[in-house]
């Protein structure tokens, strides 16, 4: 099953429909209907399928179908061919996170044989890697069409099968600075968009350093504080032209309970008070514009939900972990569905060339899911 899934190039810039249709047809042959929830263009889709009786609160097993690009990476084998070497399965998405999805799908015949008293919901989403953009539509569909809200969700991101009940949130923004071009020998006649952008980037960097030293902090996260990072910048046309435009992208990785909007307002207030008046004194049409690129909430489990307690007991890995990367678990929790993150593979090998998952870890995942379904849902 993992070999089939890896064979679909579902890089986020591409459609995931071939994979989704494969899963739909596979489940259909087992007598399980699937609902597809499409994006605006119809080129991508989420999938929601239910195994077992409806009408009672069930369990969601959730995973994303998209993967990150392989462009410029030096792979030892074809990244879209699942290759086994010394007990490891190599390929893009083997760890993040087609290994979990494949395990869930391979276990469906076993789930059908069990006398389930409540359903297992299989939830597959698109565009997680670019901001969890597909999951909200999936959750809207779930809320409208399931007769009972699930009691819990397991998001199978790679945690080496350790249960995590907390992750950071993320909000990403773009800022576009519009200045005024001039000859660089007469730079007093222009408004340098790159330099204005640089002022804000330095402000963001200083805020990151403040958070690193002053907090707030939450134990268990690495790092244990919110982070602020500028990741992309572009602008200018030639060395002798004062640049009229500059655009940069930045992100906040927030702790549970922190609001990225408050952090954004800080840099917006600085720009409005300190930078924009000087710009417009020389060029009335100068501007600083902001755009939200993506956002998803943090997950702040407290160990109190049934799914946290049960998964922690079954995984046997000690107290629940916190992870720095984001997942759709925060979105499930925001809709009232208690969630944990637990899946095969290690995030340290994800997004890299020669990404892999251990065969033994897939077996651990399968055993965990069997026991989870038996304890939570079987008669």
Image (cartoon, grey):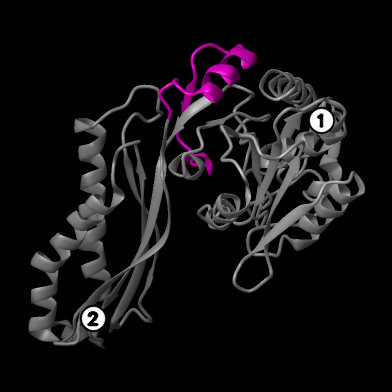
Among all residues in the image, which is located at the extreme right? 29
| Nearest to viewer (mark 1 / mark 2) | 1
The CA span between labels 1 and 2 is 61 Å
Question: Dot 1 lies on which element?
Answer: helix
Give the x, y percent position of residue 115.
81, 25
Give the x, y percent position of residue 64.
64, 47
Q: Quadrant of the N terminus?
A: top right
156 and 353: which is toward the camera: 156
Q: Is residue 3 left or right of residue 183?
A: right
**Bounds of the magenta segment:** 301-330
Residue drawn at point x = 70 percent, y = 44 percent: 93
Q: Quadrant of the C terminus?
A: top right
- Reply above or below: 317 against 332: above
Write down the residue under mark 1.
Answer: 111
Give the x, y percent position of residue 59.
64, 33
Q: Is residue 193 left or right of residue 86?
A: left
Query: N-terminal of the two: label 1 or label 2?
Result: 1
- Reply above or below: 172 against 239: above
Say whether residue 286 is magenta.
no
Per the rendering, the mark at residue 325 is none
Residue drawn at point x = 80 percent, y = 61 percent: 18
Q: Are marks 1 and 2 in contact (CB under 8 Å)?
A: no
Give the x, y percent position of residue 154.
60, 33
Per the rendering, the mark at residue 179 is 2
226 and 134: which is toward the camera: 134
**Quadrant in the rendering for residue 179:** bottom left
Label 1 environment density (alpha carbons within 10 Å; few <14, some 14–19, many ≥20): many
Residue drawn at point x = 70 percent, y = 40 percent: 54
């Amino acid at each position: 099953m993992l070999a089939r899934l890896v064979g679909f190039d579902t890089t986020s810039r591409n459609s995931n429909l071939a994979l989704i249709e494969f899963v739909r047809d596979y489940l259909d042959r087992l007598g399980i209907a699937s609902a597809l929830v499409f994006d605006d263009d119809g080129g991508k889709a989420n999938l929601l399928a239910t195994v077992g009786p409806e009408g009672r609160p069930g369990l969601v097993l959730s995973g994303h179908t998209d993967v990150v690009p392989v462009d410029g990476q030096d792979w030892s084998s074809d990244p879209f061919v699942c290759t086994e070497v010394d007990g490891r399965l190599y390929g893009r998405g083997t760890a993040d996170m087609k290994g979990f999805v494949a395990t869930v799908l391979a276990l469906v015949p076993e789930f059908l044989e069990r006398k389930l008293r409540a359903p297992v919901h299989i939830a597959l989403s698109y565009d997680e890697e670019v901001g969890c953009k597909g999951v909200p539509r999936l959750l809207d569909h779930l809320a409208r069409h399931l007769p009972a809200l699930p009691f819990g969700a397991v998001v199978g991101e790679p945690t080496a099968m350790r249960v995590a009940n907390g992750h950071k949130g993320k909000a990403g923004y773009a800022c576009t600075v519009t200045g005024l071009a001039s000859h660089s020998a007469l730079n007093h006649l222009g408004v340098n968009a790159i330099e204005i952008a640089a002022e804000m980037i330095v402000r963001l960097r200083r805020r990151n350093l403040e958070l690193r030293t002053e907090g707030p902090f939450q134990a268990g996260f690495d790092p244990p504080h919110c982070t602020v990072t500028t990741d992309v910048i572009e602008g200018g046309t030639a060395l002798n032209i004062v640049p009229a435009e500059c655009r940069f992208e930045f992100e906040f990785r927030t702790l549970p309970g922190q609001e990225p909007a408050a952090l954004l307002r800080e840099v917006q207030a600085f720009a409005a008070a300190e930078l924009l008046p000087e710009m417009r004194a020389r060029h009335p049409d100068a501007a600083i514009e902001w755009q939200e690129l993506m956002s998803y909430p943090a997950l702040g489990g407290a160990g109190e939900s049934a799914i946290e307690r049960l998964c922690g007991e079954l995984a046997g890995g000690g107290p629940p972990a916190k992870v720095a990367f984001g997942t759709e678990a925060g979105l499930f929790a925001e809709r009232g569905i208690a969630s944990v993150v637990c899946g095969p593979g290690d995030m340290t090998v994800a997004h890299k060339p020669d990404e892999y998952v251990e065969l033994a870890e897939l077996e651990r995942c399968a055993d965990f899911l069997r026991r989870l379904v038996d304890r939570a849902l079987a008669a």
